[in-house]
Image (cartoon, grey):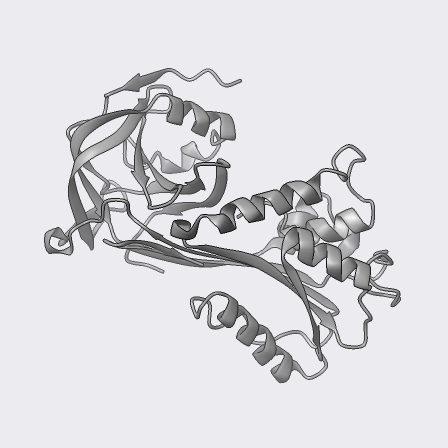
Amino acid sequence: MRAAPRLLLSVLLAQGWLAPGVAPVLPALFQRLRETLSRDRELGLAHGSLAFTHKDFDVRETFRRASRRYFGTECVPTDFGNASQATRLVNRYVSQETQGKIPKLFDEVDPETKLLLVEYVLFKGKWLTPFDPAFTEADAFYLDKYKAVKVPMMYRAGEFASTFDRDLRCHVLKLPYRGNATMLVVLMERIGDHLALEDYLTTDLVESWLRNMKARQMEVFLPKFKLDQKYEMHELLKQMGIRRIFTPWADLSELSATANLHVSKVLQRAVIEVNEKGTEAAAGTLVEMMAYSMPPIVKVDRPFHFMIYEETTRMLLFLGRVVNPTLL
């Protein structure tokens, strides 16, 4: 969810702003990834991007075709001068593409907008083995050492894959969905240590967790939760050094012959809900591992991290932190 959105990549590729060795292979890789994810009917994943362009700007047909073919992007001419109409148009498109899960992306669009890039991902994963709602009960979730809130706590007994990271002192639990998706729940051993984990999260670390997992019989308690977050990616991208594309001096001649065209905003929105049926979502390290180390009862009753990834491609779909399940 934190990576540069696909449409921004298509703009950077068109302008030749990526490294020569990277530019030729990225479009085909994205196309292959989209096709792989789309073929898995049970995965329940819909994803794409929209480019809302000022109605007076003529987008080159070559860019339209390449963006649609490789990145699944649709370009939508928009009258940003009429702010209320533009706001309704953007919100309607996003709502349709996310099946109503994101009904309102904007309160009001800036009338000075020239080019607005929007990413969406809708994941409606169903647990391979659902939690029985009959066993869901109100239970304590500890925000810190001194404060707790009541949350609907789901329960299931059965076989789960898990491991324990001795270096980071955290439990890692694997919860599979139908299709090829999986959720990893990362629970620190001590309350209050969850923020420290984020400094160490890497692809290599996650891969090492997965390699060291073993299946065993256990009882799992997991809170129901829902997260709703909008990310203004343009601010993050500026911090990464991608700045000129957001200024009037941006050269987007491969996208349009119109002068003074630049990217106004890049937005991502994530809506994730985890319940008994599953999830609805609308983003060389040496580690000592110990398999079979989790206790017979695993109770996720304190702040934790979760990751949802696709097994075949190992693509990370969502990464989040739950501090208080009672808050959106």
Image side of residue 202 versus residue 236, left or right: left
Q: Tell me where residue 254 appears, x and y as whole percent.
A: 85, 56
308 is higher (above) or lower (below) than 67: above
Residue 110: which quarter of the image?
A: bottom right
- Image point 77% across, 41% down: which residue? 18
Kindly identify the residue that appears in the image at 42 percent across and 23 percent down: 208
Whether residue 2 can be seen here: no
Q: Residue at x 18, y 50 (%)?
A: 153
Q: Could you tell me if residue 253 is visible in this image?
A: yes
Relative image position of residue 70 (x, y in whole percent): 67, 51
Relative horizontal placement of residue 245, taking residue 50 as reference (left or right):
right
Left or right of residue 3, residue 295 in this image: left
Q: Position of residue 292 (x, y in %)?
A: 23, 21
Decide which of 259, 232 is in the foreground and name it: 259
Which residue sits at x=23%, y=45%? 129
Q: Position of residue 36 (x, y in %)?
A: 53, 44
In the rendered image, which quarter contains the C terminus?
A: bottom left
Q: Nearer the viewer, residue 303 or 129?
A: 129
Query: Disc count in the image?
Result: 0
In the depicted structure, whether residue 296 falls above or below residue 36 = above
